[in-house]
Image (cartoon, helix red, strand yellow):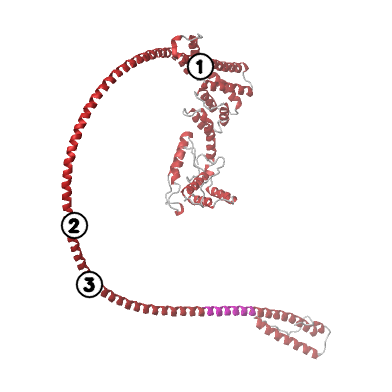
Amino acid sequence: IEFDSSRFIAPAKNEKLQWALRKQVSTWAQVERSLAQLTGTVDDFDFSARSSNGASDEDHFVHLASEQSGRLVRLVAGVEREKERMAQENEALRAENERLIRQNADLERHMEVQLAEHDRVMEEKVHELKALAESEADCKRKVAEAQLEISTKTGSFFAECTRTMEANNAEMAKRMAEFRAEREKVEQEKNAMARDMEVYRSKMAQEEAEMRRKIARLHEECEAKVAQEKVAAERRLAESRQQTDEQLRMERQVTDHIMLVLRELPPLQSAMELGNLRLLEDELRKWQADSLPERFGECKAVVQAVLKLARERLVVWRGLEQTWKDVLREVERAGSTSLPTLVQHGQRVFRVLKEAQLTKMDLQRSDPDAAEGICKVLLAWQELATSHSNNVQRSIIRKVVACPQLGPFDFADLDICLHLLDRSESRSDVFLTRAQALVEDDGTAPKELRQLLSHLGTMLFFLKYTKSEDLQLTHVEFQRQLQARKGLDPAIVDYLKWAEQNYPPGAELVPFADGKDLMDGKSIDTVLQQLRTPPRLSGWFGMGADSLGLFREIFYQWAVAMRSKFNLLVLPHHTQVVCLLAFRRFLESAVSDGTPHTLIAQVGTGEGKSMI
């Protein structure tokens, strides 16, 4: 509805026009009230008042008409919205009605199916009752037939038994007659055998007489042969005695030579075995002759070989003595020299130690001051070669110099050991204390120091971060590597999943409480006890028995061995435990064409492949 006010702008003084305007405004007011009642907004409007500001009646009616037109527009819009809302509700009710109709149809179909099923079950029941009645009648008939057949068979059986007994009696009489005939035949054969035995006895008596005659002749022949052999044996015995006497004479001569060698050579051999240079020189002075006396006889070659070996060792030992004395003089003359020079001197005296051991030279017996001089050279080199000189390094040098058998331990190994110990005593007190104990242990050979010190440093490093290991991150890393390798066997994925199920986060070998000192002896004892003790529950998260029971004792004994050796707590890493569980699953799995026959684990540096 649009209201055009332009028609009412011109002044209208006519009374009829005013009456028409009032009537139009009144009509629109009725329309407005009707629309308001439809939309639920009832207002009371008063259009009879006149303008209060002195405006003309025409202007007043124009104003009222404009306002009324606007309200009518709004009311019509509200009616349209209400109409749309009611249309939507009708549409929803129509959809719900259709759904209920479909549901009712489904229920009717289901009811028909149930009724049909009920009818079918009732028919089957009727058939079953009918079949049961037929079966009962059939059973009664068969029972009657069976009774009749049994009575018939019983009569036949008695008749058959009578016939069988008569046949058996006849057969028995026949066999008795045959037996009597056989007995008479055996009697006849027995008589014939008695006659044959009489003939055989007479023949045996004749053969026995002949045998006695042959034995008598053989006895005479044996006595003659025994006499001849006795004469030949006496002759051979005389010859053997003569040969034995000659052999004994020669052996006594050789024994005398050996005894002479055993009297004169042992001092020279003792000097060589003791490694004493001065004693070897004194003994060799007794053997200055170019040609050995003939009194050694057959042992002359042995004496010559021992003398040659002794002279060769004397030359080598004198060269070694000259070498370490030259080095000591150079060090004393030069004083504090450069590191390269001291390295060269250290290598030379270390070669002296190695050569002395290879040739069985005892530096302490040969020169009591030799070991101290060599220590002096090596200590001077150690002071310049390391940044933090300490007592453990000096102890290693003294242990190496005093060791009677260095084996494969060389100067490079000594240098590495000293650099492994090149740490400040204030900041590495724990490491140096454990290292000092290893060095002072008489059971630790110098050739083991390099590996032990490296192992000690690794253990201290991992012990420092033992509490920080995260089992959850360990499993995540294994899963990440599984995803990175696309062609991995599915069985290996199952092995690692099984390991994760049996060693989940929260089921670590040892729970570490905050503030626990893993260097303290009591704390270590507690951790070892926890390591050996299985969980109190029957299993983690209800999985059954403790799957680590097989490995707990191994971990415990290994930790005890490492503690006795290094006085440190050594526990397996989570990666090691997961790897062991995967291998256990592999070894316990059934072998088939679809499962791997070989399992190889690539272990990273520092992850502990030796323990695995």
Determine crowd level at label 3: few under 14, some 14-19, many 20+ residues with C-alpha closer than 10 A: few
> Taking the image as drawn, is residue 354 in sight?
yes
Question: What amino acid is found at the position of numbered circle 1 in the picture?
Answer: Leu
Question: What amino acid is found at the position of numbered circle 2 in the picture?
Answer: Glu
Tell me, for residue 178, which label it has, or none.
2
Front-most of 514 and 20? 514
> From the viewer's perspective, is residue 602 above or below residue 168?
above
> Taking the image as drawn, is residue 423 in sight?
no
Residue at 44% across, 80% down: 119
Front-most of 84 and 374? 374
Of badges 2 and 3, the one in the foreground is 2
Residue 365 image offset from top left, x and y in percent: 49, 16
Of label 3 and label 1, which has the lower sequence position?
3
Of label 1 and label 2, which has the lower sequence position?
2
Q: Secondary structure at mark 2?
A: helix
Front-most of 291 and 286? 291
**Within the magenta stretch, is there residue 236?**
no
Q: Secondary structure at mark 3?
A: helix
Which range is magenta? Answer: 86-106
Residue 565 image offset from top left, x and y in percent: 47, 34
**Can you identify the residue that label 1 sits on?**
309
Cα separation, mark 1 vs mark 2, equals 107 Å
Of label 2 and label 3, which has the lower sequence position?
3
Tell me, for residue 339, which label it has, or none.
none
Determine crowd level at label 1: few under 14, some 14-19, many 20+ residues with C-alpha closer than 10 A: few
> From the viewer's perspective, is residue 228 above or below residue 447?
above
**Can you identify the residue that label 3 sits on?**
155
Q: Quadrant of the N terminus?
A: bottom right
Give the left or right position of residue 206, taking residue 550 as reference: left
Determine crowd level at label 2: few under 14, some 14-19, many 20+ residues with C-alpha closer than 10 A: few
Cα separation, mark 2 vs mark 3, equals 36 Å
